[in-house]
Amino acid sequence: MGSLDGRVAIVTGGAQGIGRATVMALVKEGAKVAITNIRCAKLDQTIQEIKDMGGDALKFCVDVTDVEAVQEMVDQTIANWGKIDILVNNAGITKDNLVMRMKTADWAAVLKTNLDGTFYCTRAVLPSMVRQRWGRIVNIASVVAQAGNVGQANYIASKAGIIGLTKAVAAEVARRNITVNAIAPGFIATPMTEVLAPEIKEKMLSVIPMGRMGTDLEVAHGVLFLVSPETSYITGHVLNINGGMYMA
């Protein structure tokens, strides 16, 4: 028996990195999981692994900036499993550059995927959660939204916006037994960080008191903590998982 037996979850960007680790952690605890990803091929591999584990999953090749596609994903999940208990807003992109060199299109694309996508998915699942008077929403933010970083104004603005959105929605739905929290990961070993040059990685490690990068599973465990029955009195909170890089 898992702590999430009978629960239904949606994880966006769930086919790789933090999203995939979160999906697998939820499945191991007994949840049924609907997975979205813009890269369809990666979804098939993840779904097969879940089936091999004896888990239950749905796949949606969805761009979270597409309002109609997001709503269709939510409607189909409810049609299959009757409800939605958990939403993990993980889908995100980067298009880094200095502000004075940043293209307007790159600014807009990052804000639309990271912040608007989180809003669209949250808005779509809330009616189901409100009706059943139970829900858990976890938004993946970032340490740089708290500490700042050079060359990431669009990404930082989007993630800081997610933290603000988290607090606003948490206040709106608290009386419906719905909690809304954020996780701010530090530097995590994922496909996104694998491509960084060695000198950049070395610089990153120099500002982490623990002296190492985090793992996607460590972030996934943070998600499990926030969606567990034992944390029903935590809402509007930002959980820092950063090895001591930022303390507040």
Image (cartoon, rainbow, N blue to C red):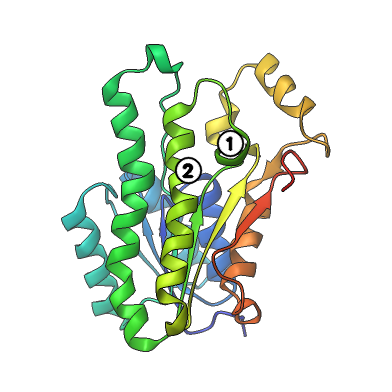
Q: Up-down: is 244 above or below 108?
A: below
The residue shown at (55%, 79%) is: 4
Q: Is residue 38 left or right of residue 163?
A: left
Q: Which residue is mark 2?
A: 159
Under tag 1, what secondary structure?
helix
Residue 226 x %, y %: 60, 68
For the N terminus, give its image quadrant: bottom right
The image shows residue 81 at horizontal and vertical percentages of: 33, 80
Q: Which residue is mark 1?
A: 144
Q: Is residue 28 above or below residue 214?
A: below
Q: Amino acid at mark 1?
A: Val
- Hey, which residue is sitting farthest top in the picture? 101
Image spot of residue 49 (x, y percent): 49, 59
Q: Residue at x 37, y 46 (%)?
A: 115
Asked whether, in this view, residue 229 is left or right of residue 245, the answer is left
| Frontmost residue, 242 versus 224 | 242
On the rendered structure, is 204 left or right of 162?
right
Which one is nearer the viewer's eye here, 179 or 55? 179
